[in-house]
Amino acid sequence: MTKNNYAMILWVSVVAALLLVAGGMYWIVKTGSQPTNMNAPGVSEITADDHILGKADSKVTLLEFADFQCPACGEFYNTALKRIESEYKDRVRFVYRNFPIPGHLNGPAAAYAAGAAGLQGKFFEMADELFVNQADWSTEDGAAMQKTLDSYAQALGLSMDKFHADEGSQAVKDKVDKDYQSGIKSGVNGTPTLFLNGKQVSPGTYDEFKRTIDAALAASS
Amino acid sequence: MTNSSEQSTPPSPHHRKLKRLALVLLGVAPLGFADASYLTAEHYLNRTPPCSIVHGCATVTTSRFAIMFGIPVALLGALYYLAVIFGLVYYLQSKNHNILRLTAAFTIAGFVFSLWFVYLQLFVIRAICAWCMFSALTSTTLFILGMWVLKSHRAYGKEAFPEKAG
């Protein structure tokens, strides 16, 4: 084999190997981008310490695992869930559980603020502030973010001393951790993940979501 | 047939060491290339994907810092690793030490960009993307190895490359 042939074969194999690698990565992203685990093995019981909105004794329960800093959760809330909650809150029980994604540096602080607001009966109001204004606080550092959280708490008329004490309390942290662990147990590996009466659903749009909930309500009556 | 002076030099221990370093670099660079390809594919394929504890999140890769000069930084990263791989393969094939030195010096750029991206993740975007951190790790490794190559070149310079001494 001549030296030129050898060089040619070397370069062709290098380029082929790199194309294979790049193609493989494209394939991984393409096939790996569907929503989380589709066969979650049931969800633990809804308990009194859960964050519950809507009709407490409804036969239809929508459980959401979400992270306040997750862009997909914000988009889902702002384009579908917010409307669904306001339209169905007299017929459906909505439950929110925290599933803070590692790597989101402001996610835990947001979850603690919501938990603290929850102790004053304003969990979902705080969650609304957090999701609607997600882009504002997501990139703030600790001190700036606390100011933003304070402004939400003030707007909701919370007692600020109690809010601050609860934000840093072990009980609030434990609840976030308990939510996360229940998610892991249920096979949740990403956010947002929704369970309708214990069965995982992945509605892409508001209309699809509405149909899913209507069907569950019809089946339960 | 004109410039074939390099191959007449018998391989000295210094050359062997540099070749070994180049092979180690060549072992690391494809990891960075694979990683950057993944991020590039993600950039072009995704809408707002769900956040996953395994696959990470789009917070970083969809941030306004993910595009530079109109080009996704993931693609720039892939091209960077590609350039390093080509430089190394070309050196191993041609034994042209200037190419190796150029490639080694180029890893400084990769390292500086990585520092900047880690800073952005920690202090500006306030979210960490595991795939981006992995790329920072590979480019830092390339940088350390690259500096080793340059240092070896300098240390062996007088002996191994007498025409460049002084």
Image (cartoon, helix red, strand yellow):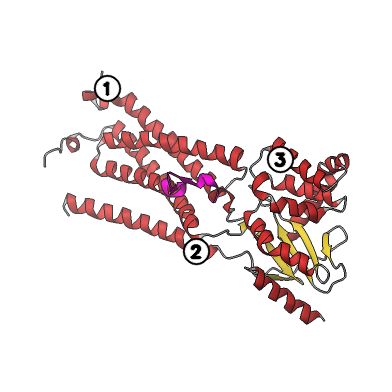
Tag nearer the camera, 2 or 3? 3
List x then y, in percent, for residue B66. 50, 47
Q: Say which residue appears at 78% left-offset and 77% top-offset.
A: A217
Say whether residue A187 is visible. no
Amino acid type for the residue under numbered disc 2 = Lys
Q: Say which residue appears at 14% left-offset and 37% top-offset.
A: B3
* Chain ID, mark 1: B
Q: For residue A30, which numbered disc appears in the image?
A: 2
Residue wearing tag 1: B158
Amino acid type for the residue under numbered disc 1 = Lys
Q: Secondary structure at mark 2?
A: helix
Tag nearer the camera, 1 or 3? 3
Do marks 2 and 1 both belong to one polypeptide chain? no
A15 with respect to A175 (left or right): left
Disc 3 crowd, CA 10 A, few/some/many (<14, 14-19, 20+): some
Amino acid type for the residue under numbered disc 3 = Met
List x then y, in percent, for residue B47. 54, 60
Which residues are drawn in magenta? B62-76
Q: Say which residue appears at 83% left-offset and 74% top-offset.
A: A59
List x then y, in percent, for residue B29. 41, 45
Tag nearer the camera, 2 or 1? 2
For this orientation, the residue located farthest to the top is B166
Q: Quadrant of residue A193?
A: bottom right
